[in-house]
Every structure is written in C-alpha cells, then in structure tokens.
C-alpha cells in the first residue's frame, strides 16, 4: 500500500487516511460533475442515465464520508475547489452536447478505474472490507463508462482531445487530493 500512494515513512493509519481522503474527493467531484450535467441535460434523453449514475456516486461519497467520520480524518482542503470545478466540468461538457457529456463520463470513469484498481491491488488483508467496497464501486464506475459509450461518447466532437484533457485533469486532482 505504501508504494501505490507514495507514502514514504507514513504510518499505516496515515496511509489509510490519505486513501480515504482522495477517494472521498473523487466521489465528491463525481457527484458535482453529474449535478452539472443534470442542470443542462436533466430534461433530455440522457437525464435518466445521468440521474442513475449520480445516485450511485452519492452512495460512494457517503461511504467515504462515513469512513472519514469513523476514523476522525478530514476531507481534502481542496474540496471547495472540487465543488466548483466538478460542477463546471459537468455543465461545460453538457453545454457542448450530450455526446461530450458522455465523453466526460468515459474519461473520468476510466481514470477512476485505474485508480481503484491500483488501490485494490495495494490493500492488504487488514483492509479487506475497504477492498470489497472498492471492488463494488469500481464495477459501478465501469458500468457508467459502458453506458456512456452506448450513448455515443466516442462520437463527441474532438473526442480524443476532450477525453485526454479530462483524464489529465482527473489525474492531477487525484494527485493533489492525496496530498492536500
């Protein structure tokens, strides 16, 4: 687990706090992205799919909020930034069209898939319960990605550029949230 998070000499408790903090930040951001998409597309054909994804992300976020409270850890200090940036990313891509919003979903969920996969691989038996939840959450994130592909994500204008930019931003957000 130390290597995956770049923890150096941190204690297992500090590493766990960092893991929960970054995962909470990601789920918090995902909720805001889908809320931004709903603000623009909520009454259109994508509305039901976006609401479904939002509902699952809220469950993920709540799990990490409860876990942070139980271990008396804190969210990232960047949460106010993710509050605004997540909503703007969701609404901004939705303003570009339904396919661009779905391209955003693909980019974010593929980044989270890689992130959760690395965490699952690094968690020991000490945290089997967390690993089980991450496995479940990862499966739901992949469901969101697949739904976005079905909804035409790859037909978005400038799909490769758009998804590459969003993936880079998501990776930066992960890196910052682990540390701040």
Image (tube, rainbow, N blue to C red):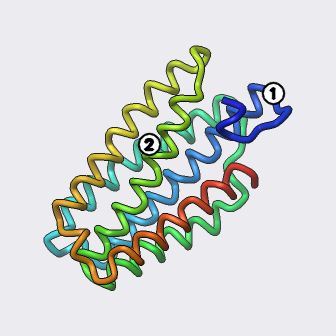
Q: Is residue 30 left or right of residue 141?
A: right
Q: Residue furthest front?
A: 160
Q: Is residue 16 left or right of residue 143?
A: right
Mark 2 packing: few (<14 Cα in 10 Å), some, or many (20+)? Answer: many
The tally of labels here is 2
Rendering quarter of residue 68 = top right
Q: Residue furthest right?
A: 9
Residue 177, image x, y percentages: 67, 54
Q: Is residue 42 above or below residue 73?
A: below
Tell me the element at label 1: loop
Residue 81, image x, y percentages: 63, 69
Q: Residue furthest top?
A: 125
- Where residue 11 is drawn, which disc sits there? 1
Mark 1 packing: few (<14 Cα in 10 Å), some, or many (20+)? Answer: few
- On the rendered image, what quadrant is the C terminus found in? bottom right
Please name the residue that numbered disc 2 is placed on.
60
């Amino acid at each position: 687990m130390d290597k995956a998070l770049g923890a150096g000499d941190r204690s297992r408790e500090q590493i766990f706090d960092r893991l929960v903090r970054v995962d909470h930040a990601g789920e918090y951001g995902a909720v805001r992205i889908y809320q931004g998409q709903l603000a623009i597309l909520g009454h259109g054909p994508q509305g039901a799919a976006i609401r479904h994804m939002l509902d699952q992300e809220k469950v993920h976020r709540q799990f990490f909020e409860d876990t942070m409270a139980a271990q008396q850890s804190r969210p990232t200090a960047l949460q106010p930034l993710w509050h605004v940036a997540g909503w703007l990313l969701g609404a901004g891509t939705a303003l570009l069209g339904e396919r661009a919003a779905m391209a955003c979903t693909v980019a974010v969920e593929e980044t989270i898939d890689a992130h959760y996969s690395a965490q699952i691989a690094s968690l020991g038996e000490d945290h089997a319960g967390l690993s089980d939840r991450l496995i479940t959450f990862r499966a739901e994130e992949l469901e969101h990605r697949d739904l976005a592909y079905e909804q035409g994500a790859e037909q978005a204008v400038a799909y490769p550029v758009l998804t590459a930019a969003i993936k880079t931003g998501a990776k930066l957000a992960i890196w910052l949230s682990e540390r701040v």
